[in-house]
Image (spheres, grey):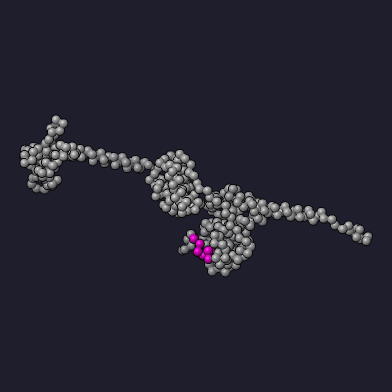
Amino acid sequence: MPKRVKTNYPGVYYREVKRLGAPGTERVYYIVFKKDGKVIEEKVGRHHADNMTPARAALIRGERIEGKRLSRKEVREAEKAAKAAEEAKKHAEADRWTIDKLWSEYKSQKPNLKGLVTDKNRYDNHIKPDFANKEPKDLYPFDIDRLRLNLLKTKKPGTVKNVLELLRRIINFGVNKHLCDGLSFKIEMPRVDNLKTEDLTSAQLRKLLEAIDKAEDIHAANIMRMALFTGMRRGELFSLKWRDIDFERGFISILDPKGGLHQKIPLNQAARQVLENHVRTKSPYVFPGRGGRKRVDIKKAVNKIKEAAGLPGDFRPLHGLRHVYASMMASSGQVDMYHLQRLLTHKSPAMTQRYAHLKDEALKRAADLAATLVQEATKTKPDTKAEELH
């Protein structure tokens, strides 16, 4: 052990030792002081490796005596404890099923889920900013209320409901997979009046058909015709492939509809004529998008046709025509609610009930007709025999 060499600073000395990583020697400084009646001797640093000087060592000695500085050993132990705490935190974070982590798992298990792109936009824009790092058990009614009220300032109730339903779906997914606990309360949804059933007068429908006939975009024209003649949804028309059409048996297969299960609807004569005259490309899709891939939008083209027909601004060209189709079926008095539900591929009868009042009107007209026929039959008619005698 090298001998101790005193310095000009009380309680500070050094030893001459071999230099680390270089030839020659260097000084290693130590301090000695009393604390709580106990003599403490500590190494404070090397001359070259730690840039230690007798003056710095004396300053450290003073801080140690006053309790303003930890020893090197205490510093190492504190760093070790901090590192252990950080590792524990990482492990704890890995075990936490936050909303963001649940959303990632949800997406990975449902990569082909219909509407996933729309859900992603809703999540990124409205849920992630405030809820990403929270676990479901950390959410309170106030958090949901604040989200709902903030969204209602700029968004329609239907949009807000969709966002809240997505949040609820993500949490329910985690609960069903036993990844997390559920909410201790029920998410309150905004009231949405989604019973709007767009309709067109005979004159409006005539003008629309004229505008469709004059349209330059044959895909937009025929998509609108199919929506009117079959009541198919926008997404179903975009997904429609030639192989889904059975011209021989007269059916259209709707794969993965909004209701969930695959369905078939009749291929009526008007729709058959549209499809038989529609131009075929190398794409498997009837109404392909860019590069023959599945179409994702046609809003601009159908709105142009709508404007040419002079229809109201709030009339939705495709979804509105589905309502027109349903309204015509219901008001005809020849289609009951069960068959209308099948034609519209509604998942439940409740969705078809919005058209029930039109069916009632048809029944009233039929009842009025019956009354008229009875009245005509009971009118007093001249006695034929009396007329002949006269």
Residue at the image position 47 percent from the left and 53 percent from the top: 155
In the rendered structure, which segment of residues is drawn in magenta?
297-305
- Vertical order, 10 against 233 (above or below): above
Quarter of the image with the N terminus is top left
The picture places residue 12, in percent across and down from the top left corner, at 9, 39
- Magenta segment: does it hold 195? no
User: Where 223 sits versus 88, above or below?
Assistant: below
Question: Which residue is pictured at 43% across the width and 39% down the height?
Answer: 181
Residue at 40% x, 41% y: name it: 138
Q: Would you say the magenta stretch is mainly helix, strand or loop?
A: helix
The residue closer to the viewer here, 101 or 282, is: 101
Residue that sits furthest to the right in the current view: 389
Between 352 and 372, the residue placed more toward the observer is: 372
Give left or right: position of 127 versus 87.
Answer: right
The quadrant of the image that shows the C terminus is bottom right
- Rendering coords of residue 280 (x, y %): 53, 65
The spot of residue 26 in percent (x, y) is 9, 45
